[in-house]
């Protein structure tokens, strides 16, 4: 039923599979209701990975060309008429940065050195599935009810113990769970800022920060986050001139630079923000990946000056998210009320899954393995990036990301655009801020970059880019 595909370079294999299967269905070569070979057989015939094949099959289901049945496989749809809304993607922004940003948030391509999560092969999927099965079978799971407004108490107590070990001792009432960190930030902004207020932000930074702050109508002022931290003379000048209400920052393993504030830098930062009455929102989503993390800002200054935000999507799973906020008493109460009013109550199913992984010790074991694996991979990635002509901003000492400068004259956005054509997702510096200085930089996820295929494709792209520069000159 399925013949091998003569794949051509320059077009993602996923796209070529979708086009070949679509032709076979629409021309009647494959009859409605007929069953496709198994996924294993298809990967062998086509010579592609299971990841690539599943992405293509999902797209064909989305086009109403295939159906699937658990345990039975994939079938040609009986009615292959495409819905009128099949061109909905065209309604999304089509500028280059928007096009480059979308693959970072979705499953696209086999090669994802620009991605923001760990590869599935790095996750403790068996422990996660076991926790899911145990929770679903347990009578304590309330199938018909909503989650607890402030969050599942046993999980919050486990988080209380975790935070205590990190130097932040707080009553459990100060810990509020949220569905994810972006929603937590959105609710905190509604509680702590008003339209027209000024918010200080690191540059570069996670691209969703800019998008989220824009929704609240605040004025954004940026401070350069370099490999060695921030310039505190400039930092104080910005505080004095703009009087920001909030400073949103990541103190440990900053995204994308990988920088962490050392104790001296943290003390000076806290001293200045206290002097100018600027509250800090500390995003600590990557801190658990640090092999020897410095003290968090919240642990040094307390919750009246710092609101702490973290979660588990980077270590456990991006598809079973639970995050949490640690805040001063009144802010914690207001946040709980907002969760109720906005429908933001966290799924108790996911809360119980995370709690079980904490209580059984699987989270701590998995975290330790990931940290060690990142350290080993990061050293190798740092070396091949240097050999390819990139400049690494700071010696790699842990975490998920390496922030590297491209050779002079190489355009990061164009490089990423050409990479997409070969099924590889890159994260050029322009995605992380508007400053032209970032356009020479690129973020690399060491877990996704530690492999010969990524290295070979990237080096070919770099060689082509450099040849074009020579030809132009």
Image (cartoon, helix red, strand yellow):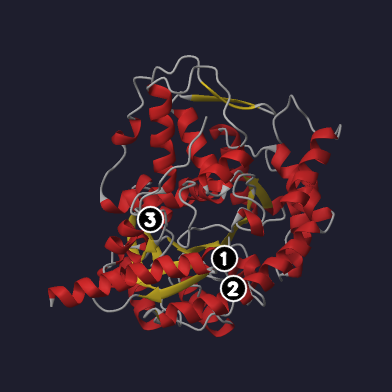
Quadrant for the C terminus in the image: bottom left
Label 2 to label 1: alpha-carbon separation:
6 Å
Residue shown at 65%/53% (left/top)? 329
- Contact, CB < 8 Å: mark 2 with mark 1? yes
Front-most of 36 and 375? Answer: 36
Residue 255 visible somewhere in the drawing: no
Residue matched to label 2: 377
- Front residue of 244/100: it is 100
| Relative image position of residue 134 (x, y in whole percent) | 83, 40
Residue on which the image places disc 1? 447
- Are there few (<14), some (14-19), or many (20+) residues within 10 Å of tag 1? many
**C-alpha span from label 3 to label 2:** 23 Å
- Using the image as rendered, state which of residue 87 and residue 443 is in the foreground: 87
**Label 2 secondary element:** helix
Q: CA distance from mark 3 to mark 1?
A: 19 Å
Q: Are marks 3 and 1 in contact (CB under 8 Å)?
A: no
Which is closer to the viewer, label 3 or label 2? 3
- Which is more foreground, mark 3 or mark 1? 3
The percent coordinates of residue 442 (x first, y second) are 38, 69
Find residue 237 and report its horizontal and vertical position in percent: 33, 77
**Residue drawn at the location 26% of the way across and 75% of the way down:** 466
Q: Residue furthest top?
A: 79
Which element type, helix, strand or loop, lies under badge 1? helix
Q: Earlier in the sequence, mark 3 or mark 2?
A: 2
On screen, 101 above or below 30?
below
Q: Which residue is mark 3?
A: 422
Q: Foreground: 393 or 424?
A: 424
Sequence-first disc among 3 and 1: 3
Residue at 69% from the left image edge and 30% from the top image edge: 146
- Circles 3 and 2, Cβ within 8 Å, touching? The answer is no
- Which sits earlier in the primary sequence, circle 2 or circle 1? 2
């Amino acid at each position: 039923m399925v013949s091998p595909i003569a794949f051509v370079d320059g077009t993602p294999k996923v796209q070529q599979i979708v086009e070949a299967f679509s032709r076979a269905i629409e021309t009647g070569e494959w009859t409605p209701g007929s069953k496709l070979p198994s996924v294993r057989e298809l990967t062998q015939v086509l010579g592609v990975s299971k990841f690539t094949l599943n992405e293509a099959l999902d797209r064909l289901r989305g086009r109403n060309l295939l159906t699937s049945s658990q345990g039975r496989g994939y079938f040609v749809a009986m009615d292959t008429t495409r819905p009128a809304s099949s061109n909905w993607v065209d309604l999304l922004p089509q500028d280059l940065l928007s096009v480059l940003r979308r693959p970072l948030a979705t499953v696209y391509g086999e090669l994802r050195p620009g991605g923001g999560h760990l590869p599935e092969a790095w996750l403790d999927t068996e422990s996660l599935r076991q926790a899911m099965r145990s929770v679903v079978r347990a009578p304590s799971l309330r199938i018909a009810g909503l989650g607890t407004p402030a969050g599942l108490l046993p999980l919050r107590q486990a988080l209380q113990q975790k935070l205590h070990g990190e130097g932040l001792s707080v009553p459990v009432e100060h810990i509020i769970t949220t569905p994810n960190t972006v929603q937590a930030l959105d609710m905190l902004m509604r509680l702590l800022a008003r339209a027209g207020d000024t918010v200080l932000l690191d540059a570069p930074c996670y691209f969703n920060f800019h998008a989220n702050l824009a929704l609240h109508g605040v004025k954004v002022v940026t401070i350069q986050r370099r490999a060695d931290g921030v310039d505190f003379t400039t930092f104080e000048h910005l505080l004095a001139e703009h009087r920001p209400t909030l400073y949103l920052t990541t103190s440990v393993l900053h995204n994308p630079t990988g920088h962490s504030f050392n104790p001296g830098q943290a003390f000076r930062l806290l001293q200045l923000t206290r002097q100018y009455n600027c509250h800090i929102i500390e995003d600590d989503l990557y801190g658990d990946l640090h092999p020897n993390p410095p003290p968090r800002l919240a642990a040094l200054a307390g919750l009246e000056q710092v609101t702490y935000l973290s979660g588990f999507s980077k270590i456990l799973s991006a598809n079973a998210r639970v995050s949490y906020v640690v805040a001063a008493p009144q802010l914690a109460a207001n946040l709980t009320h907002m969760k109720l009013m906005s429908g933001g109550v966290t799924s108790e199913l996911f809360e119980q899954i995370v709690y079980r992984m904490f209580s059984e010790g699987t989270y701590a074991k998995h975290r330790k393995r990931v940290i060690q694996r990142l350290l080993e991979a990061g050293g190798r990635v740092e070396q091949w990036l240097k050999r390819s002509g990139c400049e690494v901003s700071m010696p790699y000492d842990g975490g998920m990301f390496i922030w590297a400068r491209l050779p002079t004259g190489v355009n990061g956005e164009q490089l990423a655009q050409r990479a997409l054509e070969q099924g590889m997702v890159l994260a050029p510096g322009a995605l992380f801020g508007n400053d032209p200085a970032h356009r020479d930089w690129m973020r690399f996820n060491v877990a996704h970059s530690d492999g010969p295929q990524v290295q070979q494709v990237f080096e070919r792209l770099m060689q082509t880019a450099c040849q074009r520069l020579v030809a132009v000159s």
